[in-house]
Amino acid sequence: MESGTARIAVDLLGGDDAPAVVVDGALRAVRADPDLHLLLVGPAEAAGEVIRALDPAQRARVTVRPVRTVVGMADHPVAARADSTVRGAVHAVRDGAADALVSAGSTGATVTAVALGLGRWPDVRRPALIATLPAVAGPVVLLDVGGSLEPRPATLARHAALGTAYAAVAHAVAAPRVGLLSVGTEAGKGDRARRLADPILAATSLPCDGRYVGLVEGYDVSLGARADVVVTDGFTGNVLLKAIEGAYAMAGGPPTGGGAPRAAALLGVAGTVVVCHGAARPEDVAAGIGLAAHLWRRRATDQVRALLDGTEAGDREERTDRTTDTEVPTS
Amino acid sequence: MESGTARIAVDLLGGDDAPAVVVDGALRAVRADPDLHLLLVGPAEAAGEVIRALDPAQRARVTVRPVRTVVGMADHPVAARADSTVRGAVHAVRDGAADALVSAGSTGATVTAVALGLGRWPDVRRPALIATLPAVAGPVVLLDVGGSLEPRPATLARHAALGTAYAAVAHAVAAPRVGLLSVGTEAGKGDRARRLADPILAATSLPCDGRYVGLVEGYDVSLGARADVVVTDGFTGNVLLKAIEGAYAMAGGPPTGGGAPRAAALLGVAGTVVVCHGAARPEDVAAGIGLAAHLWRRRATDQVRALLDGTEAGDREERTDRTTDTEVPTS
């Protein structure tokens, strides 16, 4: 268990079974981590349930910001612009009342509220949702798992750099190996998006001594044999993560080291944000709160941001080179 | 074990570890099924290994068609136009020397050779590779798993009808439930391709009392709770299938009822064709030969073809209706 105070804003009304599941998850998190402080954003009665269930000594680590409105899973993301619990949590981070936020509500609504309230990083066109899976040789960082369903090749390249920095900062992976998910490992395998992205990723400068290893396959997400970071579009990453979760359930339970995560970090925004699955159970919400605290204690967002600034310069140089190549054709 | 003679042409040189793995797989298949006849297409010495290892009584069920050239995994599919083992297997089916064919070679090369040698069904723009996974309530039919990486919505709709007929004919699923794989079950979830395809699938007439249940998620491929047939593009299906296989390996082995299949049926072509994974093991090749014999004994290809003819008429009527709607606008 890492130490150091971490103040996490929790969206009490996000998720299919909110607030009950979030209340249970918050209780578990507070009891497990003595340096954790929670700011519960939502109805006062739900927050009261958490506080009443805690020992008096633990209650001092829980505060409440009453908000009523919730964004439904079927609502359009801009509904998050209305007064809502996720917006309340975003404001708590913006105002400095919390260090990070966790929501199990609609991913689209959370991303929108965070982008509006905290801002995006200017050089990351699309924030990425990052999931970490257990694998044989260590964790596999999979991105995107739902933030950007149809990324351009340049976005995949940016996500490759993001994922590399995240693997190094959040999981202490040295010199991360980065793969692009496709249907085979031979160059040229895949659909148009992969064939376009492969050479762009090969030319992308990666932080933390990361290196691009080329195309990887579905196995590599579960087993981690070829890559520590697997880059894909949010559609593929999302269905993949859920299929792996289903496979573990079919096989009688997840492997030692943990199953498919139900909490993902949102990177590319100016704040520490964790999104839980809408069907999160109490242990998933607690894991999401724990992930947010872990990321805050490592100052992961700031570190990743600083590492990306390094690669950005590299990209710029490469772009200049390419322009020169075009102006003075060689043959 | 089903009975009835089935004569399967086997591509001895297809697959990463051919011919050794194919030789082993063919031996297992011949020994397991007394009504199975194999036509081995490839080098005479590899075929000789199979024949020498069999009992004299079993040898009568194995014949050889010597061919030398192989299509590599990295070769362009049109290389299959050259003289090759997969082409030899296709010719054996075309000439009536075999009832079905099995190859663990490049999927693209096999599809091309089959389309050229046996022909496509005129109303199926893209043949589909169909994999069957074990699930809680029965098998889940997943298509496409690599035949068509970027299908149009109309192709996804055609594949929905194909998969429905296949589930009924090959797996005796009554009134198959058909889902479109996406990132959530609420209408409107998914990328552009899914949002376009969802209403088209909803309007598609399905054979065998099949019904479209809307969007399903990654879990549904592994668990089968919501659908018996899951329709997706070949890119997503391929990475998904491999991720599930990797997850079973991580979890310490596949569930009771079998793991992720390494043999898939190719539908939409005028013949019975099974494609094995390039990294197939001997048991996978034997399973692929068994699948081909099963499909032939049920006359699955002809039955699916006949069932599609029924739905095709329905589609035509709907098209006429829509044209009328356009010509006489209502409002």
Image: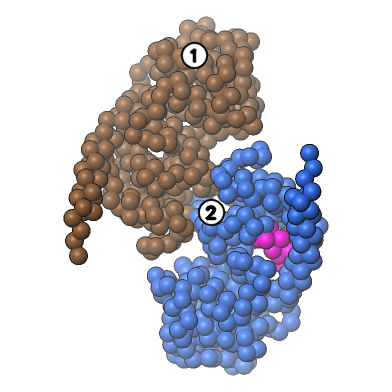
Chain colours: A blue, B brown
Which residue matches tag 2? Answer: A236
Q: Quadrant of residue A76?
A: bottom left
Q: Would you say residue A159 sits in the magenta stretch?
A: yes
| Label 2 crowd (10 A; few <14 / some 14-19 / many >=20) | many
Type of amino acid under label 2: Thr
Task: Please tell me which residue is depicted at 64% across the width and 58% down the height of the picture.
Answer: A154
x and y percentages locating residue B94 in the rendered image: 42, 16
Above or below residue A29? Residue A253 is: above
Q: Which residues are magenta?
A: A158-171
Query: Foreground: B258 or A93?
Result: A93
Above or below residue B304? Residue B196 is: below
Of circles 2 and 1, the one toward us is 2
Q: Quadrant of residue B226?
A: bottom left
Mark 2 secondary-structure assignment: helix
Which residue matches tag 1? Answer: B39
Q: Do callouts 2 and 1 mark residues in contact (Cβ within 8 Å)?
A: no
Q: Quadrant of the C terminus of chain A?
A: top right
x and y percentages locating residue B159 in the rendered image: 38, 41
Along the horizontal axis of the image, is A309 left or right of B105? right
Q: Would you say residue B318 sits in the magenta stretch?
A: no
Above or below residue A20? Residue B78 is: above
x and y percentages locating residue B137 in the rendered image: 37, 48
Type of amino acid under label 1: Leu
Mark 2 → mark 1, Cα distance in angstroms: 39 Å
Task: Please tell me which residue is depicted at 18% across the width and 55% down the height of the picture.
Answer: B328
Which chain is mark 1 on?
B
Q: Main secondary structure of the magenta part?
A: helix
Q: Quadrant of residue A94?
A: bottom right
Q: Quadrant of the N terminus of chain A?
A: bottom right
